[in-house]
Amino acid sequence: GAGVSQSPSNKVTEKGKDVELRCDPISGHTALYWYRQSLGQGLEFLIYFQGNSAPDKSGLPSDRFSAERTGGSVSTLTIQRTQQEDSAVYLCASSLGGQGYYQPQHFGDGTRLSIL
Amino acid sequence: GDSVTQMEGPVTLSEEAFLTINCTYTATGYPSLFWYVQYPGEGLQLLLKATKADDKGSNKGFEATYRKETTSFHLEKGSVQVSDSAVYFCALSSGGGADGLTFGKGTHLIIQP
């Protein structure tokens, strides 16, 4: 397809388990972003990749969160030892990169994560 | 740091009414400004954008003008339809992409026939 693809669309897991969320950006988009959407916090920016590099990881909520991107394409967001407060919709977006000022981000449908 | 403030609603209007959703921002430098829309059961979609002062973004009958003097980017539509019912998010980008988008809390718009 032409859009940003995320999988799984829904994930239910028990507290303490690890989860891995996947994002496949639009072909040719060099920039990739992860966000979290929750009722209490709204939309929070987590991390940004330009190519395979993430210049700033300070937006990740805790050291249980990590993200990587390989081959300048697919990215995975991993949450270790999940907690109930991790329950949210995790959104991925991509853009043409370069000067982000002028490049709007295109969003996937998200992964709805529920921690029991 | 950067921030975006918008009315949260819900905002309920009758069909064909005039719509304004206020958005103000705080940012360093000269950010780009965006409105995104999330229709029920769907993902976030870019509605319109403006990249410099006095630019007007427009799409699907919606408009917003980048006002640097009032740090505002209010969304307007002259005659709303039931199909416009959605959540609208105002957002800015000021870091060249390095710090992602800063979003407002979103405004839930309900249009009644």
Image (cartoon, coloured by chain):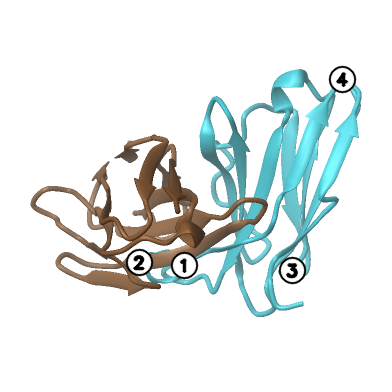
Same chain shared by disc 2 and disc 1 = no
Q: CA distance from mark 4 to mark 3?
A: 30 Å
Q: Colour of chain A?
A: cyan
Query: Which residue is tagged 2?
Result: B49
- Work out which quarter of the rendered image holds the N terminus of chain A and state it: bottom right
Query: Which residue is tagged 3?
Result: A73
Q: Nearer the viewer, mark 2 or mark 1?
A: 2
Q: Nearer the viewer, residue B58 or B97?
A: B58
Q: Nearer the viewer, residue B109 or B89?
A: B109
| Chain shaded brown | B
Q: Chain of mark 1?
A: A
In the displayed structure image, the side of residue B84 where residue A111 appears, left or right = right
Q: Quadrant of the rendered structure where residue A85 is?
A: top right
Residue B107: which numbered mark, if any?
none
Mark 4 vs mark 1: which is more N-terminal? 4
Amino acid type at circle 4 is Lys
Q: Nearer the viewer, residue A86 or A99?
A: A86
Any part of residue A18 in sight: no
Q: CA distance from mark 2 to mark 1?
A: 8 Å
Query: Which residue is tagged 1?
Result: A104
Query: Residue at the spot x=85%, y=50% of the render?
Result: A8
Q: Residue furthest left?
A: B69
- Work out which quarter of the rendered image holds the C terminus of chain A and state it: top right
Q: CA distance from mark 3 to mark 1?
A: 18 Å
Query: Residue at the spot x=23%, y=70% of the render?
Result: B56
Q: Chain of mark 2?
A: B
Query: Which residue is tagged 4?
Result: A15
Any part of residue B78 in sight: yes
Q: Chain of mark 4?
A: A
Amino acid type at circle 1 is Pro
